[in-house]
Every structure is written in C-alpha cells, then in structure tokens.
Image: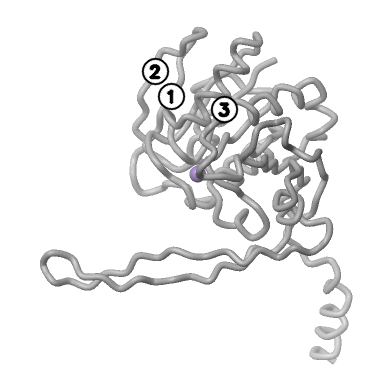
Amino acid sequence: MRILLTNDDGFFAPGLQALYQTLASDGYEVGIVAPEGQRSAAGHAITLFEPLFVNAHQLPFGGEGFSVRGTPSDCVKLAIQGGIVAKPDLLISGINLGQNLGTDVFYSGTVAAALEGVLLGVPALAVSLASYQFGDFQPAAGFVRKLLKDWSLITDGGLVNINIPGTPAEEWRGVKVTRLGKAIYENIFERRQDPRGKTYYWQSGTLTPDYEEDTDLRAVGDGYVSLTPMHSDLTDYKRLKSMSQLMDQFMS
Ligand code: MN
C-alpha cells in the first residue's frame, strides 16, 4: 500500500517526520511531497503566477521525498497530477502542530491538502495534534498506525479530519465521531511600527470554542480523539427549497 504524506508546517516539521518514521518502519511504501517551509493557514490556495521549485531529499527508508516552494494544495496536485510520485492509495496530511477544529478547516492548509487529495480521487486523512505545548507526536502517529488497518472503510473514498489531544494516549478518554463545531476567534490586530516608522499590523486571535454537543471542539476539549467525516460539497441543502420558491416568486 502506497501512502503520500504532506502537511502545511513544512517538509522538515517534526509532526510529518514522526509520522513518516512510524509508517515507513511498519513497511508501508511512504512518499513525501510537502512545502519547503511554514505554510500554515494557507487554506486551499494554489500557485499560478510563480514556478514551483522542487528539491529532492533522500528518505531514510528508501526513495526520495520532495520539498516544494508552494502551498500544501500545490504539493498534492503536483504529486498526483504532476506525476513526481506514483499515485498513492491514501493521502495523509499532518501531523499538524496545533488543532484544526470547527471553522479552522476553512483556513487550514492541513485540511485543504487532504481535501485536494479527495478532489483528485485519493482518499485522505487530515491529522492534527491539538496542542502547541505537548511536543510529542508519537501517540498521534500510533493512532494513525491503528487506523490504517481499516483505512479503506474509515475513509470510504473521502476525507476524515482527525484531531488528537496533546496528552499521552493513556489519558485519552476514547474516540468520538463528530461534526464540525464553530470556532469563534476574537481577532486582535496589534498595531506596530517598523524601525523606519512605517505602521504595520500583526494579527492573532483568542478562541472562544463552541462546546455544543457532538462537535469536534467539544470532543477534543473533553479529552477525546475526534474524527469528522468531511466532503467538498458546501451546498446548504436546508435552504435549497425555500430559495427556489423565493426565486419562483421573483420571476412571476
Ligand atoms: Mn500547520
């Protein structure tokens, strides 16, 4: 079985490298095509007006990995459509440093890269460690290893967004299948001045998580591993009928 790894934290990020080590030492055929540097919050952007420079790196378990001067989605497109690696059976994006929960999925390069795989016909997992402090990717990599036994059933050809608590595996309370919640960020734009007196802003935010029942935010907040099945169809099916009735009235 052939697995393609990518991420948005960059080729040399510890989360991706830990996952590579775990899966390659299990005997999976693992390739890497990932951004050469930090591309977190790149969303689903692709690069059209600049070239995609690529560097090859010898991988410890054989073969070559590729770092790309592009976005996470560029990497997946280049890997699958550009033919720089053999077509994978499964794409895994991560392990990201930091959670990708609820509304985060719109900004996340990690989730976008996984979704790009699905758009190109490759089932995908987006995997995030929901902590910036914990620092140990082994428990999360171990969880992915377990999932791989049934990856085909679990992905069902689509995308699963996985968030793993930043604690040792013994402390996890279990696994929950969840829906996306609403991560509400209070954005702060700090106004600063550069050494030449020019004003600039640096944005950051504090999260007010929505702890509604059944959400990914609630599950991870309560110490569970969260699995959210996702697809690319953003249609609001609840409004289809009412909107078409409204348009009929407009036109009559
Ligand atoms: Mn990231």
Mark 2 vs 1: CB contact within 8 A: yes
Residue at the limit of the structure toward the front, as seen here: 171
- Residue drawn at point x = 62 percent, y = 17 percent: 23
Amino acid on which disc 1 is placed: Phe
Q: Position of residue 166 (x, y in %)?
A: 61, 40
Q: Position of residue 185 (x, y in %)?
A: 56, 67
Amino acid on which disc 3 is placed: Leu
Q: Which residue is mark 2?
A: 57
Precedes in sequence: disc 2 or disc 1: 2
Q: Which residue is mark 3?
A: 5
Q: Is residue 71 left or right of residue 153?
A: left
Q: Position of residue 173 (x, y in %)?
A: 79, 40
Characterize the local packing of mark 1: few (<14), some (14-19) or many (20 or more) Cα atoms within 10 angstroms. Answer: many
Dot 3 falls on a residue whose secondary structure is strand
- Picture quarter containing residue 147? top right
Residue at the limit of the structure toward the left, as seen here: 196
Give the Cα separation between the discs numbered 2 and 1: 6 Å
Q: Which residue is mark 1?
A: 66
Relative height, residue 45 to residue 62 (above, below):
below
Q: Which quadrant of the figure contains the C terminus?
A: bottom right
Characterize the local packing of mark 3: few (<14), some (14-19) or many (20 or more) Cα atoms within 10 angstroms. Answer: many
Precedes in sequence: disc 3 or disc 2: 3
